[in-house]
Amino acid sequence: MLGGGAAGLFCALTAAQRGRRVLVLEKANKVGKKILMSGGGRCNFTNLYVSADNFVSSNPHFCKSALSRYTQWDFIAMVERHQIAYEERKHGQLFCIHSARDILAMLITECEQAGVVIKTNSDIAQLQTLEGPPEPHFQLEFIPDTKDGHQLEPLTCESVVVATGALSIPTLGGSGKGYTVAQQYGLQLVPRRAGLVPFMFSDAMKPLCERLSGTSLDVTISCHEHAFTEALLFTHRGISGPAILQISSYWQPGDDISVNLLPEIDAAALLLEAKQEHGASLLRTLLAATLPRALVLELQGIWWQDCAEKPLAEFSDQLLTEIGRKLNDWRLKPSATEGYRTAEVTLGGIDTDGISSKTMEAKQQPGLFFVGEVVDVSGHLGGFNFQWAWSSGYTAGLHA
């Protein structure tokens, strides 16, 4: 097992429970680092409402088999069996009440009880196929431990599961090792980029975001016919928050995003009605009842500075209609995302055309499996990436 993250550990315990001898090789000094930091340290370990629509992939059908083989209800049952306290938050997200350490401890306990051996500070230098009857075997050669110079002896095995994660958050062990292995065995790669990641700006939005840093509000963000209604957070680098992270998985460089600051409200109709009923009011006063005042003042400087001190009654219907349209469709053009440094997932990865959806095994190389984030399957925010780790790891664990 190459990698001791969520998918690797789950695959390991699944395979060991069916009698396989399993060795987990983790290049970091401890397993499950990404589990521990997830969900603000509380681990959003799955979601009540899991479907293929919650995942981004070049083949949207690929994930269905694994997700149906090991469901969110199966993982919830394991959590409850270990008496881990959890809670449901909005949109069906399930979090540990106490700590993400509870989930990691559960996985390690299950591995230990099944006889899984875990070795940390163990990074492979080379993977080779040894042809021979009745099945091909693999030989692993290791990179010397940088701390003590110790090098593990080469070892052979019947199956190799690549659960090395991807490029996101490299400080937690993300790497491209799994892609190298895939290419070595002829699998294709789908172009990779950062997903579930904040946006940055290089135009006039950059200083605006700096001034509004810390301000948040619920909005609807849309791009390429995908839309999410969640919180937006202004930061000193740009915009973040759940709505932004979600839409980032569908954004490409050069794209606009549409921000609806007043979801489910026809802003133009609201302003025209207010002109009739509250004609003596200032527009900023009206909007500050619904939107953060600091944001309203920034929008005033952009959209109606010349009329800032005029009562609504003196605004033309045309200007109010135009301002209302912008409130419902504020077009922004990010210059970039923050990249892999803060991305929660890596979009793209190993092309699923080369992998069996029923076993996670490489179609052209018996005994070689790929699970978790290294594959071209990425979930939305909300526990879906962990569910993919459990489901894909379980599926491979049944066959590795």
Image: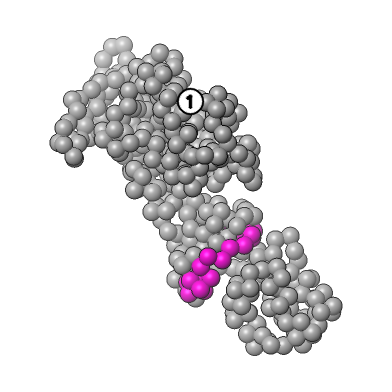
Q: Which residue is mark 1?
A: 394
- Judged left or right of residue 30, residue 11 is right
In what quadrant of the picture does the N terminus appear? Answer: top left
On screen, residue 311 above or below 14: below
Looking at the image, can residue 243 be seen?
yes
Q: Nearer the viewer, residue 277 or 271?
A: 277
Q: How is the image coloured?
A: one colour
Q: Position of residue 147 (x, y in %)?
A: 18, 39
Q: At x 45% / y 59%, what residue is drawn?
A: 337
Magenta segment? 206-225
Q: Nearer the viewer, residue 61 or 291?
A: 291
Residue at the outermost top position: 134
On screen, residue 100 above or below 219: above
Q: Position of residue 169 (x, y in %)?
A: 38, 49
Looking at the image, can residue 56 be seen?
no
Q: Position of residue 116 (x, y in %)?
A: 36, 21
Q: At x 42% / y 59%, what residue is drawn?
A: 338
